[in-house]
């Protein structure tokens, strides 16, 4: 009793009231609600935006060159035009598709590979565990942007290669998380019980370990999505990521840079799009960390002032 | 302390070895390494001459031997751009980046310790919430965008700060350091806050309070040193990741550091220089990891003891 | 030596109607509800109860170390006549150490892992008496000698993880008695230790108590410890006091069915071959404490009146009381 006071819902008390539904919890946290709305909007635009804009992201109109944002030139003039007279709004919408089509597959790949390897390594332990962890250490001990830069130098900077290299550099993040949790779970009684029934280890991992680790992994993935997005935009900014005529937010910043003094909107607006998306994902991940942790979830039901923001897990930093 | 160091050196050397070998094999994976070293416009005669001069006609084990012995003697070949030895160019650029990274991490760590501790002292307070939102934002702003907006606002519109170069007073440092700073600062504030909240609710802090210790003694005398251990690990990783930022910042602000050198050699296909820069970075990271471990051992008596096992 | 206005009749620690609220997922619950007790110098009072009954929370609120999720909402904690709950933070800090002190259960986490123990033991002297670092260290060595640490001068420079569990508990006790407090609160001081070490620690506590004339509040769930060590006992259940009095009287003639149930479940009195008597059921969830008697769900004597009306703590003899409508019936048994 000397340590932190636990909410008095011990195992032997009558069944606790059902935990509130997650969307109710989300509604109660205004910041997280706004963040999820922003992310939903970004995803919708990325998925369906190109249907609406047609070829306006590429259509040049030199008479409309470098128009500032205004209400005078219809919807596509709202956010101004670039030096070739292309609508910045249309390009932002087009770039949202490209950016997400790189970030989402990269995150999914690393999530699946990293989690599978980590669960396997952690469950079996021994040599399998130490070899896997060493490899993860090697990848993590080197700046990911540098790995990407070198690899994209040797191979061509196609979207496919960017996805692959981003996925590889992010695998260790999931691997470490999954390994730690699965190593902890392997000695639990319910896993032992399953083992005494002769359940093959592959099935134990799938049925008994994965469901427990999954919320954590998904939270890490949300946060990692930011990181992958930032790396992709950095690469594109440096000229070794997405190549024209394709367009991504990072590339738009790079293209707008030389007109910074005269037409700020070309470089600034795509950056705002990146910041809004990544900050939303970070806020949502912080919220999800509270919401998926049964020992923490109750904090979300408290009045606002008693709650503390949660931190980024330490794997997320590179 | 000595067996501790020896063990750490051995285990941190593995990634280093991987990088050294990785660079070698990567250059040979695409077929003829000459394609990597020479510009795309090189004539077949130039290619043949270069290939012979660099020993690319030898068998792979012989090439590996030459590569390794060369690397030990800091001989990575000569730059195609300048004709200087690649190692010289890299060693010239290195101190610039080191200074930039050093100043940045110093500011990031001290600032984060201050802000994170303040936030952790009263979880849920206004300071805590503001620090939480600010740090989350700081950790998710793209650094290249922050840099050019900084240039736009302070350099172009307000004309307060220089926008590129290293010549001049301390004001040339402000924008590059600020750009490099935001991400590590944001992440560290959250780490400091987390581990400080943990340390402040630990029984030994309660005991310190029961002895009548005031807030200053509780935070600085008891909690901080315990909370700083995870912070140190993260700070080490962030310093590694700072190379990512250095590439961007040096490109934007025109600083002649390692990052700029790497991007320039990539854009001009100067593979010898790129290779030397990558290897030097790897060695620095190797040294940094050991430094972090030594700091761990100095701060925590349990780490010092745990080694012989 | 201390400026406390000494009055032999006034208890060194007097807790009156203490209420502590705890914020939980399902709302605010009352974890400690109107707890009162008093201890005189030289005497030992045991706070007895199952885990979760509020005894530790009572102790933490007395020394002002509650976690932020808990809050004292009523009552008074008087030390030498002053109500510590009304004091400012700075004034309370002045009492922490020279007047009020606490020993925790887990000595490993209660000692700072990165500081040499000598420095931690000397800290009270540096805080309250402004001793130099060297002089505080001298005092620490003296304390370590007193609590029986071998080679104290050498060991003062060692770290907590280099000591055994029993030695760590000795260090913690030494730290708590450093400034001769009037009141020492011991929160399950021996629970984490081996039985043989437990006895040593309890003996050390007793010796220190006689030597320094302290009032001791011993928090425990161990009936044997209460029987051997305490003068008075306060039995707690679901945040309330259900019975109090001298250990001798309460243990020989319990006047509350819960106390009786606890005493009956001690294995020594059990009959071989029969199931061990136990109090059936489990304590109520703090968010759903019944409006009548708190013990009604588990009580063998429960009647309709118990559901309707909460029995107040009332006198059932010289200097003892119980909170049961039917305590007379137990008396007759």
Image: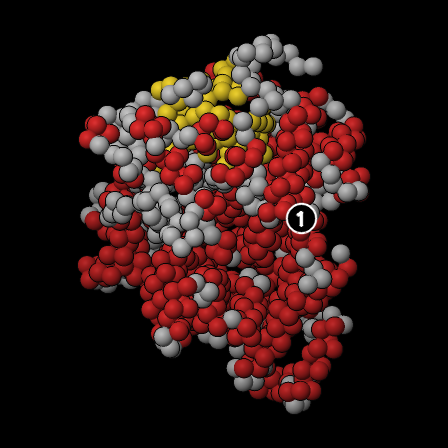
Left or right: residue C204 compared with residue B164? right
* Tag 1 secondary structure: loop
Residue situated in front as seen by the camera: A5 or A306: A5
- One can see residue A295 in this view: yes
* Numbered label tally: 1
Task: Give the percent coordinates (x, y) of residue C214.
Answer: 62, 23
Where, by quadrant of the figure, is residue C100 drawn? top right
- One can see residue A110 in this view: no
Task: Give the percent coordinates (x, y) of residue C294.
Answer: 30, 32
Left or right: residue A228 compared with residue B236? left
Q: Is residue A177 above or below residue A73?
A: below
Task: Give the percent coordinates (x, y) of residue B105.
Answer: 61, 47
Q: Residues within 10 Å of mark 1 (few under 14, many from 20)?
A: few
- Mark 1, residue position: C164
Q: Is residue C5 above or below residue C110?
A: above
Residue at image position (56%, 71%) is A130
Residue situated in front as seen by the camera: C82 or B161: C82
Q: Is residue B5 above or below residue A300?
A: below
Residue at image position (43%, 36%) is C49
Task: Give the percent coordinates (x, y) of residue C74.
Answer: 39, 20
Residue situated in front as seen by the camera: B188 or C57: C57
Residue at image position (48%, 45%) is C268
Residue situated in front as seen by the camera: C224 or B159: C224
> How was the colour assigned to the protein in this rendering?
secondary structure
Left or right: residue A45 compared with residue C69? left
Residue at image position (73%, 38%) is C148
Where, by quadrant of the figure, is residue A108 drawn? bottom left
Mark 1 belongs to chain: C
């Amino acid at each position: 009793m000397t340590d932190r006071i636990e909410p008095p819902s011990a195992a032997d008390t009558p069944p606790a009231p059902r935990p509130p539904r997650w969307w109710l919890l989300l509604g109660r946290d205004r910041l997280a609600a706004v963040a999820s709305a922003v992310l939903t909007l970004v995803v919708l635009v990325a998925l369906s935006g190109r249907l609406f804009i047609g070829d306006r992201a590429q259509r040049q109109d030199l008479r409309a060159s470098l128009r500032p944002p205004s209400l005078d030139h219809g919807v596509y003039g709202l956010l101004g035009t670039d030096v070739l007279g292309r609508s910045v709004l249309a390009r932002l919408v087009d770039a949202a598709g490209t950016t997400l089509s790189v970030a989402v597959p990269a995150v999914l790949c690393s999530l699946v590979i990293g989690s599978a390897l980590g669960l396997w390594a952690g469950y079996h332990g021994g040599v399998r565990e130490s070899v896997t962890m060493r490899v993860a250490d090697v990848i993590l001990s080197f700046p990911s942007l540098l790995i990407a830069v070198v690899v994209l130098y040797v191979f061509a900077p196609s979207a496919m290669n960017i996805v692959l290299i981003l996925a590889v550099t992010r695998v260790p993040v999931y691997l470490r998380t999954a390994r730690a949790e699965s190593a902890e779970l392997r000695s639990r009684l319910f896993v032992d019980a399953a083992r005494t029934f002769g359940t093959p280890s592959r099935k134990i991992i799938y049925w008994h370990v994965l469901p427990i680790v999954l919320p954590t992994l998904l939270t890490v993935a949300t946060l990692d999505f930011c990181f992958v997005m930032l790396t992709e935009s950095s690469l594109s900014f440096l000229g070794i990521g997405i190549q024209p005529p394709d367009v991504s937010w990072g590339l738009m910043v790079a293209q707008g840079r030389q007109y910074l003094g005269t037409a700020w909107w070309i470089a600034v607006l795509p950056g705002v799009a990146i910041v809004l998306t990544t900050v939303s994902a970070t806020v949502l991940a912080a919220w999800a960390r509270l919401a998926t942790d049964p020992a923490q979830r109750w904090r979300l039901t408290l009045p606002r002032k008693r709650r503390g923001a949660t931190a980024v897990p330490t794997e997320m930093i590179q | 302390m000595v067996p501790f160091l020896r063990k750490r050196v051995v285990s941190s050397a593995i990634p280093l070895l991987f990088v050294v070998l990785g660079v070698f094999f990567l250059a040979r994976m695409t077929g003829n390494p000459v394609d990597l070293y020479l510009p795309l416009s090189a004539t077949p005669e130039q290619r043949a001459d270069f290939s012979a001069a660099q020993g690319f006609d030898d068998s792979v084990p012989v090439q590996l031997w030459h590569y390794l012995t060369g690397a030990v003697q800091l001989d990575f070949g000569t730059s195609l751009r300048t004709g200087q030895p690649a190692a010289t160019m890299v060693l010239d650029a290195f101190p610039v980046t080191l200074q930039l990274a050093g100043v940045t991490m110093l500011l990031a760590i001290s600032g984060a310790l201050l802000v994170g501790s303040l936030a952790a002292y009263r979880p849920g307070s206004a300071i805590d919430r503001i620090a939480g939102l600010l740090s989350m934002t700081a950790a998710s702003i793209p650094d290249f965008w922050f840099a050019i907006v900084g240039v736009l606002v302070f350099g172009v519109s307000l004309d307060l700060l220089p926008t590129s170069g290293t010549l001049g007073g301390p004001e040339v440092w402000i924008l590059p350091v600020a750009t490099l700073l935001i991400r590590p600062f944001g992440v560290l504030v959250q780490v400091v806050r987390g581990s400080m909240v943990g340390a402040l609710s630990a029984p030994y802090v309660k005991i310190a309070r029961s002895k009548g210790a005031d807030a200053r003694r509780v935070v600085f005398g008891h909690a901080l040193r315990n909370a700083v251990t995870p912070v140190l690990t993260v700070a080490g990783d962030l310093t590694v990741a700072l190379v990512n930022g250095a590439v961007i910042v040096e490109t934007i602000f025109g600083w002649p550091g390692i990052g700029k050198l790497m991007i320039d050699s990539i854009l001009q296909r100067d593979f010898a220089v790129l290779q030397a820069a990558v290897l030097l970075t790897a060695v620095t990271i190797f040294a940094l990891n050991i430094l972090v471990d030594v700091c761990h051992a100095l701060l925590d008596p349990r780490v010092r003891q745990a080694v012989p096992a | 030596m201390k400026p406390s206005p000494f009055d032999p009749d006034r208890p060194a620690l007097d807790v009156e109607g203490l209420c502590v609220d705890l914020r939980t997922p399902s709302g605010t619950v009352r974890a400690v509800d109107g707890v009162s007790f008093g201890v005189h110098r030289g005497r030992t009072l045991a706070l007895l109860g199952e885990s979760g009954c509020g005894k530790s929370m009572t102790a933490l609120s007395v020394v002002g170390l509650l976690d932020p999720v808990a809050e004292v909402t009523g009552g008074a904690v008087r030390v030498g006549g002053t109500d510590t709950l009304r004091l400012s933070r700075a004034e309370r800090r002045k009492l922490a150490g020279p007047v009020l002190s606490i020993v925790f259960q887990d000595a490993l986490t209660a000692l700072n892992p990165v500081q040499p123990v000598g420095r931690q033991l000397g800290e009270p002297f540096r805080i309250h008496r402004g001793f130099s670092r060297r002089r505080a260290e001298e005092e620490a060595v003296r304390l370590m000698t007193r609590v029986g640490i071998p080679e104290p001068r050498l060991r003062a420079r060692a770290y907590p993880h280099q000591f055994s569990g029993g030695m760590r508990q000795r260090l913690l006790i030494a730290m708590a008695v450093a400034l001769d407090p009037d009141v020492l609160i011991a929160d399950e001081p021996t629970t984490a230790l081996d039985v043989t070490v437990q006895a040593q620690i309890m003996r050390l506590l007793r010796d220190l108590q006689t030597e320094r004339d302290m009032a001791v509040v011993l928090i425990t769930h161990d009936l044997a410890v209460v029987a051997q060590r305490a003068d008075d006992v306060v039995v707690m259940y679901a945040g309330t006091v259900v019975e109090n009095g001298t250990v001798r009287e309460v243990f020989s003639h319990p006047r509350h069915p819960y106390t009786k149930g606890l005493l009956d479940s001690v294995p020594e009195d059990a009959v071989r071959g029969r199931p061990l008597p136990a109090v059936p059921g489990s304590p109520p969830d703090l968010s759903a404490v019944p409006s009548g008697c708190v013990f009604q769900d588990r009580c063998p004597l429960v009647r309709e009146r118990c559901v309707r009306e909460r029995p107040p703590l009332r006198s059932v003899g010289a200097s003892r009381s119980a909170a049961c409508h039917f305590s007379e019936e137990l008396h007759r048994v």
